[in-house]
Amino acid sequence: MNKSCVGVGVQNCSIDGFKRSVYPAAYLLIFVIGLVANLISLWFFLKIWRTQRTLSSVNLFMLNLNVSDLMLICSLPFRASYYINNSNWIFGDAICRIMSYIFYVNMYGSVYFLMALSVIRYVAINKPYTYKRQQNYRYSWLVCLSIWLLVSLASVPQLFSRTQPANSNTMRCLELLEPSPDLLNTFIIMNYGALLLGFLMPLLVILVCYMFVVHRLLRQNRAQANRHQYKKIFSLIIIVLVIFLACFLPYHVARSIFLQTEWDVCVHGSTSCRYIRGVRKAAVITHCLASANSCLDPLLYFFVGENFRNFWRRQSRKKPKIHKTQCRQTRDTPKTEMQQMNT
């Protein structure tokens, strides 16, 4: 196999202008919306922690999901600056590697934390006694640490995505620049592994869990069913499936097609430039959609966690001044309500 690409003409199919138009606008929009939504959510979790000195397993997984999203959001201004600066990286080689690493840690961390939330919901609905016995704070932390360890180690290859000089005045980052067939072949193999273990397997687990949950709920007597339980469960199902189908599915499909197309062009050379540009533009758009999952995750906290809504209702009803005789009541009320955590 040749050490360099034979498709020299493919470099004339550049979409640098499209990237400069789409990436900065999308990244900065996601940054503003995601930062506000996730900081508010983080404040909520910290309030619960200060009140109870503990978190339920559901809220613990959501807190870790929240931290993962904040990591990605804080990296977006660096990415936007790169494309605003005509694809010139000015932050050094180490930051370039970290930016690529953070994106994959966040994406696959989100996938696995959403899978964990779905499994917990399945156990709570179908095996409530088992769920109550397994409400172990240390066990939940162990699962969270295992997820972080898994996605962190699996994303280590992204730390080798170093900066590359495009010319004497421009340093490239976050993209392929004159790849070799061997390098593209390695990327394709890694992509299929990530596709299988990082997307298809968690999605299958989620779909199976929701299938059993919906089946169980439909069999329940309507008179015995809890209306709020129905709303929370179906909200969880809808939001998680929207995140997977709107954010993660398009990205993994486009990435697979993109890498295979780049390999075909690199090895065989003759491919329609219009098709190449279309594939590359699809990769750009779906990359933005994958980043937007950090804006959708806070919807879980609001629609799925009843305590989240109750918390904000109490905050909106608070008065600036409270008499001494009411202080004990206002301190005791949130504490007893927050003990009824989302299961």
Image (spheres, rainbow, N blue to C red):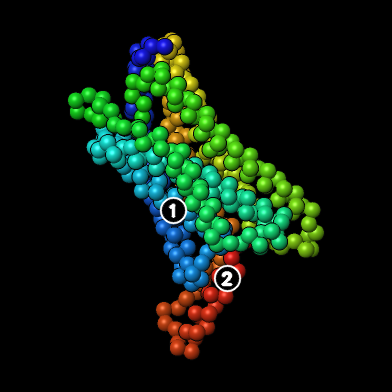
Q: Position of residue 202 (x, y in %)?
A: 59, 41
| Mark 2, residue position | 339
Q: Position of residue 195 (x, y in %)?
A: 54, 33
In the drawing, does residue 56 fall left or right of residue 228? Answer: left
The answer to whether one can see residue 260 in this image is yes
Q: Quadrant of the C terminus?
A: bottom right
| Mark 1, residue position | 67
Going by the numbered disc 1, the residue's amino acid type is Val
In the drawing, does residue 161 fall left or right of residue 185? Answer: left
Going by the numbered disc 2, the residue's amino acid type is Gln
Which residue is pictured at 63% across the width and 57% down the height?
232
**Helix, strand or loop under label 2:** loop
The answer to whether one can see residue 302 in this image is no
Asked whether 199 or 20 is in front, the reply is 199
Q: Position of residue 71 (x, y in %)?
A: 39, 49
Q: Residue furthest left?
A: 168
In the drawing, does residue 224 fall left or right of residue 75? Answer: right
